[in-house]
Image (cartoon, helix red, strand yellow):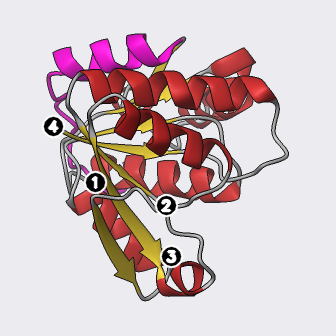
Amino acid sequence: MNVCVYCSSSERVDRVFFDVASELGRLLGERRNNLVFGGGNVGPMHALAAAVKEHGGRVLSVIPKVFDEKGLTYEGSDEVTVTRDLQERRITMIKNSDVFVALPGGYGTLEEVSENVTMRQLDFHQRPIALVNVNGFWDGYLAFLDQLERERFIRPEHRALVHVADSPAAALDYLDDYAPIDVPDKWGD
């Protein structure tokens, strides 16, 4: 299975985020899953990819040309796709993945999650996404989604498209058991 993981590439984040990325990588590798990720060799992103490789999984890196040219591509990649820009990177990652996991991250991770959920809401794909809520990281985002539902910007079934897990193992269990949710395709109501 190709598992897309969105996560941070910051070296400045707390050690716990590196540890969770490594734990997810270990689980993916032991399960012989393929990691599809942003291709970086820094921060939790690097810890994730290194753990996948160390435990027998394959790493498929998708990285924009500008980052590749700066030497930021994970060296242990089994396959590298270099894209023109970030937009092409996000779409390439979605197209080449069966399921999605989001670890804590910054603007890029938030953008990836939001685009992915929007594409699912609009039925461009029916694949699941799980957020790993390390130390309550996603609590503010989830409260915002609750507000969107309360104020009728999204339907309850759209709110249900975002699954929250308290650990990498729980996220993978959810993804293994996922059955697509029927999302009405009504516009403007």
Up the image or down, 72 lies above or below 57; here it is below
Report crowding for label 4: few under 14, some 14 to 19, many 20 or more residues within 10 A (C-alpha).
some
Dots 2 and 4: beta carbons under 8 Å?
A: no
Q: Which of marks 3 and 2 is nearer the N terminus?
A: 2
Q: Earlier in the sequence, mark 1 or mark 2?
A: 2
Image quadrant in which you'd find residue 146: top right
Q: Nearer the viewer, mark 1 or mark 2?
A: 2
Q: Nearer the viewer, residue 155 or 7?
A: 7
Q: Classify mark 4: helix, strand or loop.
A: loop
* Residue on which the image places disc 4: 1
Gap in angstroms between the C-alphas marked 2 and 4? 20 Å
Let me know if residue 128 is in the magenta part.
Answer: no
Gap in angstroms between the C-alphas marked 3 and 2? 17 Å
Q: Which of 37 and 105 is in front in this view?
A: 37
Up the image or down, 127 lies above or below 112; here it is above
Q: Which of marks 3 and 4 is in front?
A: 4
- Number of labels in the image equals 4
Q: Which of marks 3 and 4 is nearer the N terminus?
A: 4
Q: What span is in magenta?
A: 167-189
Gap in angstroms between the C-alphas marked 3 and 4? 24 Å
Residue at x 50%, y 76% (from the top left corner): 86
Dot 1 amino acid type: Leu
* Residue on which the image places disc 3: 86
* Residue on which the image places disc 1: 122
**In-image side of 188 versus 33 (left or right):** right
